[in-house]
Image (cartoon, rainbow, N blue to C red):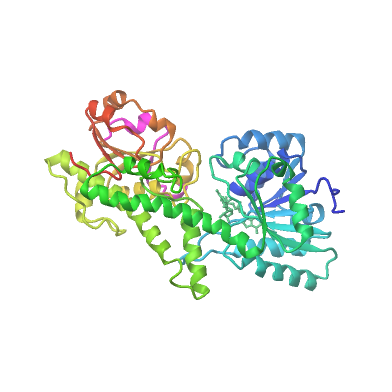
Amino acid sequence: PIGGGPERPRVSVIGTGYLGATHAACMAELGFEVLGLDIDPAKIEALTRGELPFHEPGLPELLLKHVQSGRLRFTTSYEEVGAWADVHFIGVGTPQKPGETAADLRFVDAAVTSLAEHITQDALIVGKSTVPVGTAARLRDLLAETRATAGLDGTVELAWNPEFLREGYAVKDTLTPDRLVVGVESAHAEALLRQVYAKSLTEGTPWIATDFATAELVKVAANAFLATKISFINAFSEITETVGGDIGTLADAIGHDPRIGRRFLNAGAGFGGGCLPKDIRALQARVSELGLDRTMRFLAEMDDINLRRRDRVVDLAVQVLSHHRDGIARSAGDTASPVPSPATVEVLNGTKVALLGVTFKPHSDDVRDSPALDVANRLFTAGADVAVYDPQGNANAARRFPRLGYVDSLEKALVGADLIILLTEWDEFRQMDPEYVGRLVDQKLLIDGRNVLAPRPWQDAGFTHAALGHRFSP
Ligand code: NAD
C-alpha cells in the first residue's frame, strides 16, 4: 500500500495560486492530510498563517479551518513534499509565453523535475494545470529519465486531471465538480485517483478515465467552446450596434433552444482572465506545431472579436461625450491602435471617468488580461482622469498600472464624474440607485459595458444610457 495507507493517501499540491490553494484546502476538507508547496515564500508564509493571498469566496474560512486543525500545511521544500506525500497534484501556472501565443511550460517542467528528483517512495504525480496536447506524454518521459539518472527508489507514475473550476465559485466547483476527467496509463493510477475523489464518485459525478491526449484536449476544447460562445454573441453585437435591434432579446430567444442554451451569451466587454485568452491562443499555437494550421483558425477570429469589444467601449465613450458636448455623436476612428487617435484624445482629455470594475469578472480579484483594466488604461493614455473602483481588484490593478487613479469606494468614483463606465458586473454596481448616482455626478452619462443596468430607470433619472450591443442613438 502507498504511504498513508490505501484509504487515505497523503496529498501534496504543487503551486498554491488560485487553482492550487483551492485544491489544497478542498482536499483537506475531504479529509486528506495535505501539504501545499510554492516557490513563492511570501505566499507560503501567508497561507501558513491561514491567510489567503487572493480573493475567493468561501476559501478563507476553509483555509483557516484546516490550517488550525493541522490537516493542511504549507512548505517551500520539495524535499519535504517528496518524502511525505503519495499523490502530488501540480497546479503551477502555464501562462502565455512573453511575445508569443504558445503556452510557457517552464513551470510545469520545473515542478515535474523537482518532484522527480525528490520523491523517495512510490507516488503518483497528477497534473492539473492546463497544458497543450502532448505535454503529459513528454513529462512522463522526462520523469522516467530524471528518476533513472538520479537512481532513486520507488515507482513514480504520471496522470493528468484537468481542472474546470471557475474563479468566484472555486470551492463549490472543486468539492462538487460537473465531471472528473483523468488521463491515466495504468489501472493503479486510476484506482488511486478514484480513492482521492471517492466522495464525488459516490455523489454520482461523471467519471471520465481516458488517455493523456484526450484529458488534455477536454480542457482546451471546453475553453475554446466557451470563448466561441461569448464571441459569437459579441459578433452579433457588432450588427445590432450598426443597424439596431436588441442583443439581449436576441440572446434570450436563441437561448431558449436547449441545443444552444442561454448561458455565456451575454453581450458585453468580452472575456479575459488567466485562462480563456491564453488557452485559445496556446491551442492555435499547438495545432500549428502539429501542422494543422487551418484547424483552429476560427479561434483567431474569436480572439479578434473579443478584443474589438474593448475598442468599442473607447469609441462609445467618445461618441457619448461628443454628443453631450456639441450634439454630434462623433466616432473616434481607429481605436484599435495602442496610440489613441487624435479624436479620442480631443474628447477624452481631462474628462473625469468613473470606471466601475477592473477584474475580469465579479467575485474575483483577478485582473489578468482583464478587458476592464485594458479599457481603463486606454482611457488614461488618451488623457482621461480615471477614477477606478473595484470591490476586490484595486490592489492587483494598481500593481499592474500604478498611474491610474484608484479610489476605495463607489461614491468616491462617482463624485464629480463626467462619464460612468461599468465594466465588471459586481452586485454593488447592479444595485446602484440612478437618482442617488445622479446627484453625485457632474454629467449624467452612463455606458453599461456588461448589459446589467435596465435602461429605463436610468433614462428616467435623466441619464444618457449607452450599452454594448446596442446602437447609440441619443
Ligand atoms: P497562479 O499564477 O495563481 O498560480 C500558480 C502558482 O504556481 C504560483 O503561486 C507560482 O508561484 C507557483 N509556481 C510556479 N512555479 C512553481 C514551481 N516550480 N514549483 C512550485 N510552485 C510554482 O495560476 P492559477 O490561476 O492557479 O493557474 C494554474 C494553472 O491552472 C494554469 O495552468 C491554469 O490555466 C489552470 N487553471 C486555472 C483556473 C483558474 O480559474 N485560475 C481554472 C482551471 C485551470
Q: Could you tell me residue 403's position as x and y percent? A: 38, 47
Q: Is residue 349 visible?
A: no
4 horizontally vs 312: left or right:
right
Q: Residue at x 61, y 62 (%)?
A: 214
**Stretch of the chain drawn in magenta:** 399-417
Q: Is residue 192 left or right of residue 463?
A: right
Image quarter (top left, top right, bottom left or bottom right) of the C terminus: top left
Can the viewer see residue 21 in this picture? yes
- Residue 414: within the magenta? yes
Q: Can you tell which quarter of the image residue 184 is in?
A: bottom right
Between 80 and 320, the one lying in front of the other is 320
Query: Horizontal placement of 311 versus 88: left or right?
Result: left
In the image, residue 241 above or below residue 78: above
Is-magenta flag for residue 287?
Answer: no
In depth, the one of 38 and 27 nearer the eye is 27
Percent x, y for residue 379?
A: 30, 48
Vertically, is 312 above or below 184? above
82 and 455: which is toward the camera: 455
The residue located at (31%, 51%) in the rendering is 236
| 193 vs 351, nearest the viewer | 193
* Residue for point 27% across, 55% down: 335
